Image: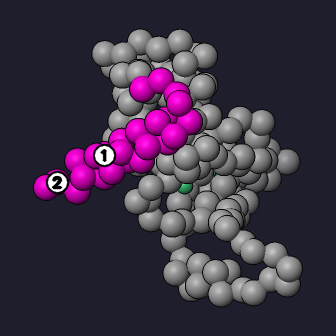
């Protein structure tokens, strides 16, 4: 079986179990939102998801989208991030390679950063009187495009002077 189809079936099953356990309605819209999230590898915000949903065959209201996202967060199928702006970003949680995030403080671009060594160090930490469940690591700085752009601007301002 194709890996993506398999993942899709597993997450659908997990969602079904959660909805059944919490006596929530199993609407086609909710599954369509889950499918769309798992068809995409990237981080997204609510507006992007809303637009993508409405381009698909399922037109959903913002309220439905919001409610479904709350359910997906509660059953750990989606992760929520706050990358230093007021806006929240989301990404799929199941079968997503664990990664850290590099955030450009100039253009707000977010890149995934995989570092096995870092992951091992953090996971092996024993913290007194605390049981870690998960963590997020955000590294803020300048992306290469912004660094280049800033260098150019600096050079030009020197010429003007
Ligand atoms: Zn940048
Ligand atoms: Zn990510």
Vertically, is 71 above or below 29?
below
Q: Which residue is mark 2?
A: 2
Q: Secondary structure at mark 1?
A: helix
Tell me the tag on residue 90.
Answer: none
Q: Quadrant of residue 151?
A: bottom right
Vertically, is 80 above or below 141?
above
Q: Is residue 17 magenta?
A: yes
Of residues 20 and 124, the one drawn nearer to the viewer in this rendering:
20
What is the crowding at mark 2: few (fewer than 14 residues within 10 Å), some, or many (at least 20)?
A: few
Q: Quadrant of ligand 2?
A: bottom right
- Does the rendering let one see residue 146? no
The residue located at (65%, 87%) in the rendering is: 124
What is the crowding at mark 1: few (fewer than 14 residues within 10 Å), some, or many (at least 20)?
A: some
Q: Is residue 159 magenta?
A: no
Tell me the tag on residue 8.
Answer: 1
Tell me: is circle 2 under 8 Å from ligand 2: no
Of residues 154 and 17, the one drawn nearer to the viewer in this rendering:
17
Q: Secondary structure at mark 2?
A: loop
Q: Residue furthest left?
A: 1
Vertically, is 35 above or below 93?
above
State which region is magenta: 1-26
The residue located at (54%, 66%) in the rendering is: 99
- Does the rendering let one see residue 161? yes
Tell me the CA gap for discs 1 and 2.
10 Å
Vertically, is 71 above or below 67?
below
Q: Can you give x and y, in whole percent of width and height, for residue 149 in the image?
A: 64, 50
The residue located at (23%, 47%) in the rendering is: 5
């Amino acid at each position: 079986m194709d890996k993506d189809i398999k993942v899709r079936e597993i997450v659908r099953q997990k969602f079904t179990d959660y909805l059944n356990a919490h006596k929530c309605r199993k609407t086609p819209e909710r599954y369509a939102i889950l499918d769309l999230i798992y068809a995409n590898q990237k981080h997204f915000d609510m507006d992007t998801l809303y637009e993508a949903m409405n381009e698909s065959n399922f037109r959903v209201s913002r309220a439905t989208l919001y409610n479904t996202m709350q359910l997906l967060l509660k059953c750990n199928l989606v992760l929520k991030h706050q990358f230093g702006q007021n806006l929240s970003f989301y990404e799929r949680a199941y079968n997503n390679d664990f990664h850290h995030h590099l955030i450009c403080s100039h253009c707000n671009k977010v890149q995934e950063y995989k570092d096995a060594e870092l992951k091992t160090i953090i996971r092996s930490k024993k913290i007194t009187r605390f049981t870690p469940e998960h963590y997020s690591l955000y590294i803020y700085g300048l992306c290469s495009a912004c660094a280049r752009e800033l260098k150019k601007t600096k050079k030009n301002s020197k010429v003007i002077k």
